[in-house]
């Protein structure tokens, strides 16, 4: 059995679960505060709850894209001569950085999508959400999800720029 791969699997499961729970909880809290203070809505509004669900899925999708860059970092680091404790610390450090970047990008994309759509339409989406207009909520969710799908590869590419790849010589020979 390859101990480094087994260790990676265990660390990935634990970190993915804990990180996923933390990100979903934090996003839910951000949306709840945003809803109460900015939108003046509470959890009894079905349209607003649908919007929160779309935001949670969108953020989860964007953050889940960092798994491959995190694994690439681990594979590179595991090929070096560092101890298991240093390997775990480095894995968690890079993973935390990648997750923070993707989470921040996801929130920016969500709120930017909502802002741009609100600016381009003649209706007041906030008023419609307050009136529990589920159709408007579905359109907003579709916009958020589409923007997340379209930008996720760019966010992943940005994160891959931080992978500690070895330097190759400029010239060979």
Image: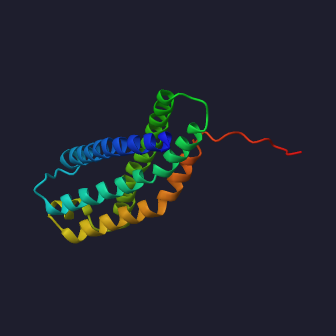
Instruction: Assign the C terminus to one quadrant of the image.
Output: top right
Q: Nearer the viewer, residue 76 or 20?
A: 76
Vertical order, 79 against 59 (above or below): above
Q: What residue is drawn where x is 29% and y is 60%?
A: 54
The residue at the point 16 percent across, 52 percent down is: 41
21 or 106, which lies in front? 21
Is 149 placed left or right of 46 in the picture? Answer: right
Q: Position of residue 157 (x, y in %)?
A: 56, 52
Q: How far across and how far down the image is residue 155, in percent? A: 50, 52
Give the vertical position of 13 relative to 50 (above or below): above
Identify which residue is drawn at 29% across, 41% down: 22
Nearest the eye: 33 or 86: 86
Q: Nearer the viewer, residue 173 or 62?
A: 173
**Quarter occupied by residue 12:** top left
Q: Is residue 20 left or right of residue 155?
A: left
Q: Position of residue 158 (x, y in %)?
A: 55, 49
- 45 left or right of 29 in image: left
Q: Colour scheme in the image?
A: rainbow
- Residue most extreme to the right: 173
In the picture as drawn, the residue positioned furthest to the left comes out as: 44
The answer to which quarter of the image holds residue 78 is top right
Q: Position of residue 109 (x, y in %)?
A: 41, 54
Q: Residue at x 30, y 64 (%)?
A: 141
**Horizontal placement of 115 versus 44: left or right?**
right
Q: Residue furthest front?
A: 1
When the figure is inspected, residue 169 is found, relative to residue 51, above or below; the finding is: above
Give the total number of marks visible in the rendering: 0
């Amino acid at each position: 059995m390859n101990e480094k791969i087994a260790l990676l699997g265990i660390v990935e499961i634990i970190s993915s679960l804990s990180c996923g729970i933390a990100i979903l909880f934090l996003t839910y809290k951000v949306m709840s505060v945003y809803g109460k203070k900015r939108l003046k809505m509470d959890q009894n509004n079905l349209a607003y709850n649908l919007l929160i669900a779309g935001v949670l899925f969108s953020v989860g999708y964007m953050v889940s894209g960092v798994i491959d860059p995190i694994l690439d970092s681990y594979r590179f680091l595991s090929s070096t001569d560092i101890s298991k404790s240093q390997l775990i610390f480095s894995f968690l450090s890079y993973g935390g950085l990648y997750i923070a970047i993707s989470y921040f990008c996801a929130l920016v994309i969500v709120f930017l999508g909502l802002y741009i759509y609100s600016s381009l339409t003649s209706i007041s989406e906030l008023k419609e959400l307050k009136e529990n207009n589920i159709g408007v909520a579905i359109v907003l969710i579709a916009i958020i999800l589409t923007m997340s799908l379209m930008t996720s590869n760019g966010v992943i590419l940005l994160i891959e720029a931080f992978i500690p790849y070895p330097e190759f010589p400029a010239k060979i020979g």
